[in-house]
Image (cartoon, rainbow, N blue to C red):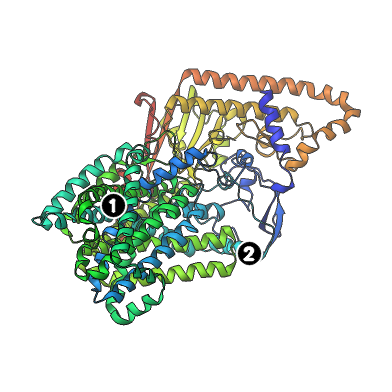
Amino acid sequence: MAEGSSRGESDLSSLDSVDSRWVYQDEEWSQTVNDGEEEGGGGGGAEDSPRQLDSDDEDSGEYKLIRTEPRIDPFDVEALEVRGAQRNTFENVTLARKIVLAFLTLGVVFGDVGTSPLYTFSVMFSKAPANGKEDVLGALSLVLYTLILIPLIKYALIVLWANDDGEGGTFALYSLICRHAKVSLLPNQLPSDTRISIFKLEVPSTELDRSLKIKERLEASLALKKLLLMLVLAGTSMVIADGVVTPAMSVISAVDGLKIGVSGIKQDHVVVISVSFLIILFSVQRYGTSKVGIVIGPVLFIWFCSLGAIGIYNLIKYDTRVLRAFNPIHIYYFFKRNSTNAWYSLGGCLLCATGSEAMFADLCYFSVRSVQLTFVFLVLPCLLLGYLGQAAYLMENHEDTTQAFFSSVPTGVFWPVFLIANVAALIASRTMTTATFSCIKQSIALGCFPRLKIIHTSRKFRGQIYIPVMNWFLLALTLVLVCNISSIYEIGNAYGIAELGVMMMTTILVTLVMLLIWQTNIFIVLSFAIVFLCLELTFFSSVLWSVGDGSWIILVFAIVIFLIMYIWNYGSKLKYETEVKRKMSMDLLRELGPNLGTVRAPGIGLLYNELAKGVPAIFGYFLTTLPAVHSMVIFVCIKYVTASFVPQSERFLFTRVCSRGYHLFRCIARYGYKDVRKENHEIFEKLLIESLEKFIRREAKERSLETDGDDSESEEEYSMSKFLIAPNGSVYSLAVPLLDEFNNRNNFISEASTSEEVKLASTEPMIVDAEESLEMELSILRKAKESGIVYLLGHGNIRARKSSWFIKKLVVNYFYAFLRKNSRRGTANLSVPHSRLIQVGMTYMV
């Protein structure tokens, strides 16, 4: 007890002026704390002040840039103790561990881009046939500079640093943006959410001023929020589509090499063998990234070494003059000779950069440095040598462009290379599948995808996951694609569409990160956006021109995924807003009195709901339908925040609802989208009760320290407006400024020494009463715990009103209802016995 107190006070005393932030505030805003819980639904505090409410018109009025201390509210206290904006699992790993991680990246991150030499030149020359050596040089020059610009400069050197605490992908970028600006459409954000990972703005400058203006503009415009969300959903849907087309393209291109080694092999045989390989591939996906990575890492290492060795052999044997392709003038000559056909071939050229997005999306499995070092010192050199060697062979053998890679392999090592290529192709298929799993988990946590069962496959690495439903869903769609479009040229075009879609979304989001968070110089930002957007739009125009050859299937699939995500987000937002509007009035609870108009039976009731603020309307339904209510009721909100993870010590945030006699509490259990939720219900209950007991003790201690309060003040007003207690032991008073109170407490006591005896005499009965009150409430808590804990689950459903538009009825009553019915329950991770469950459903007309 005493130890927790000293720790909490020392943490507070360490908060000095360097922790202050530069923020925009309107000039008339007052930092006084309003009490009451009608709007905030918590224990009052700064959450209830007009400047803290999450409303659309929050940023209206005149603003000025000021330095301010973090504002406090009941759900904000623990978050102030978090140090550091970026917490990465790989920060303190040893050198040996970094080498192992770099080795594992071969089998997880670079399988896709590593197998691109199997098909890049074949697809390119199917659009623009090679009529001479200059055409080969021009195509090679295109490939070389595409590799340098997109995978190396854009992703390895820039985009990888835009990670969200080690998490990559479009939703990680969206989460990063949401932490620095209120752009999420789901209105359940609290100030404490963004302070889990503290973000400190720099001293005012031109870049900071621009950043704050962009932030203000984003938060004030509903249209920009929707546009940003749609860009993120579009990018994520393309990643999922990429998870379908990558296995099809990689496996078929590798198995297609049999046509070179065995003359009797036909396309039907290639399809059957590819289907068998794909079934095996998706069947072993459940064994996890780290386990499979240990096995397949050496295979990819051999594959990249083989690429480099074959490239060097072909360069020496055929033509070293292909090194001239590093001169970009050959790209100009290539387009001059082939014009339209050269433009068509851009879709095939992009295939050399496939897997670039996987470098970013799979970042959760490894560190940034391990990915960068492996790519720069092993992957990229071997790829360049491989393409140079193929081009050297094609300089003398123009007719072998349909099987450029396998035709360039020396006869003596054909079958070993063929075997390694097929294993590498299977590994490449896993690359985008794991990236798909990561993106889906992020989107589920941020309320943009129906909840699915997620299995964490590693106890060491937080982000390694497996989603069974999506695994078999991707397998089914991949088999459909392989059986219907068996030509690598048509699949290659579909591949380009999926890759370019997510690349363009990533470019836009990283540009916003540069402006809003990094505060990069505007010329650098414009250079990044203009160069890469123009480049990707040029490639995209090429693949869209050939969309009618069968690649439209991928576009249709991506659109379906986009609609599923958008409908789920729309329905979830509508449901949450409706529950906020229907929440119980605090005046009604006060009128009912401490007994809540019914009988208070021994026990603890955990009422699960999705509201982060306010008393849910379903509690009123429990009051009117149940013969009794538990002696202690805790409103539990399990909430995912826009952060990668939340430390266990900051998991629970407590506040009191109404006065002490009501025995009503609110608890927000916060999780990051990277967190593992595998707690047994008994462990969850133990942690929750311990945190509640610590909260009650600290609350009582703060009351005993209060000596200058108004005696006429009611207990409820005192509990709501005078102090805030964090369950981890920290004490915060709202009666005076936060820092002044703790820095000057000793001075205050010494200055009051003249009247010490009088004060001791007058406060002694109060201290005794406070101790008795504390013991009484703790006794009630213990008895309630002994009587048992019951889970009260409220399932809120929505239906469109009869007067609603037809489209709204269709979306809400059928599409969203179907997704919600077939999604995983939010409390499915807690293995609660059915005998301790009370479930009630309510339907809201919206």
Q: Quadrant of residue 320?
A: bottom left
Q: Earlier in the sequence, mark 1 or mark 2?
A: 2
**Residue contact between numbered discs 1 and 2, judged by CB atoms under 8 Å:** no
Q: At x 52% / y 38%, what residue is drawn? A: 93
The residue under label 2 is: 207
Say which of 163 and 676 sits in front: 163
Q: Amino acid at mark 1?
A: Tyr
Looking at the image, can residue 817 be seen? no
Depicted 453 relative to depicted 408: above or below: above
Q: Position of residue 212 (x, y in %)?
A: 61, 61
Q: Quadrant of the N terminus?
A: top right
Q: Position of residue 708 (x, y in %)?
A: 79, 34
Secondary element under disc 1, as helix, strand or loop, is: helix
Q: Which mark is residue 814?
A: 1
Depicted 811 relative to depicted 633: above or below: below
Say which of 232 and 813 sits in front: 232
Residue 662 in the figure: left or right of residue 601: right
Q: Position of residue 393 (x, y in %)?
A: 26, 65
**Residue pushed farthest left?**
264
Q: Position of residue 185 (x, y in %)?
A: 47, 55
Distance between the alpha carbons at the discs numbered 1 and 2: 47 Å
Depicted 426 relative to depicted 747: above or below: below
Secondary element under disc 2, as helix, strand or loop, is: helix
Tally of numbered discs = 2
Q: At x 11% / y 53%, what residue is drawn? A: 269
Around disc 2, counting alpha carbons within 10 Å, would you say few (fewer than 14), some (14 to 19), or many (20 or more)? some
Q: Quadrant of residue 130?
A: bottom left
Q: Amino acid at mark 2?
A: Glu
Residue 235 in the figure: left or right of residue 666: left
Looking at the image, can residue 332 be seen? yes
Residue 82 in the figure: left or right of residue 606: right
